Image (cartoon, rainbow, N blue to C red):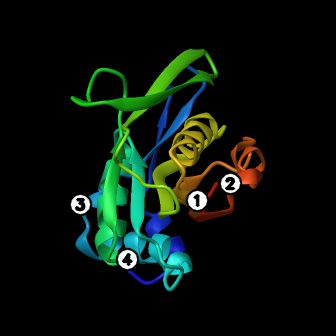
């Protein structure tokens, strides 16, 4: 396993999930292949090496998978952003719109500090709604956002364009 094209062979399409008309990109076969997982993490981390990343932030739940691995790879800490009701202490939150409804993300108030250099990580970039909310939450606590790294980007959706204000957006696989 040496190239992004080889990683694509481990991503399977699941039609009509989670609702009719959607083709879900299932990356779980990639996760069970040690060489593929290592390559995916390396390719997600490489653009941010030497940039002074202090914290990697990942949104629930699939952002946790790659976020912790990137944090280790970049010798940084990891901070989770959770759905409502999952964090036990004082927290900040942000409500955001989804294609068919609304949601909320939360993070402990002391999870990031003013001026800390943060990389935000997730598995997939589609419309950008969740990622924009994560960026706003991190910025709202005073951190310095260095960029965004995702495994998969759906280029036919406006996610990248909607994130221009938040720095570099890096995607390993583009569909």
Residue 74, disc: 4
Give the residue displayed 40% in from the left and 63% down from the top: 55
Give the residue displayed 38% in from the left and 80% down from the top: 1
**SS for dot 3:** loop
Tag 1–tag 3 contact (CB < 8 Å): no
**Going from the N terminus, do you reach mark 2 or mark 3 first?**
3
Vertical placement of residue 168 versus 45, above or below: above
Residue 32, disc: 3
Q: Of discs 3 and 4, which sits in the foreground? A: 4
- Image location (x, y in percent) of residue 26: 41, 45
Q: CA distance from mark 4 to mark 2?
A: 20 Å
Q: CA distance from mark 1 to mark 4?
A: 15 Å
In the picture of the structure, the residue carrying the numbered disc 2 is 166
Vertical placement of residue 98 versus 62, above or below: above
In the picture of the structure, the residue carrying the numbered disc 1 is 145
Q: Of discs 1 and 4, which sits in the foreground? A: 1
């Amino acid at each position: 396993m040496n190239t992004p094209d080889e990683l694509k062979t481990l991503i399977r399409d699941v039609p009509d999930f989670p609702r009719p008309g959607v083709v879900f990109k299932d990356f779980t076969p990639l996760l069970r292949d040690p060489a593929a997982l290592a390559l995916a993490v390396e390719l997600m981390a490489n653009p941010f090496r030497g940039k002074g990343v202090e914290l990697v932030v990942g949104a629930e739940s699939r952002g946790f998978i790659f976020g912790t691995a990137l944090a280790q790879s970049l010798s940084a800490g990891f901070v989770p952003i959770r759905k409502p009701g999952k964090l036990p202490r004082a927290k900040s939150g942000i409500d955001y719109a989804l294609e068919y409804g609304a949601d909320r993300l939360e993070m402990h108030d002391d999870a990031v500090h003013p001026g800390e250099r943060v990389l935000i990580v997730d598995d997939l970039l589609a419309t950008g709604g969740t990622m924009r909310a994560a960026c706003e939450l991190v910025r709202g606590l005073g951190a310095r956002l260095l960029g965004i790294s995702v495994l998969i980007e759906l280029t036919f959706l406006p996610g990248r364009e909607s994130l221009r204000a938040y720095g570099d957006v890096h995607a390993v696989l583009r569909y």
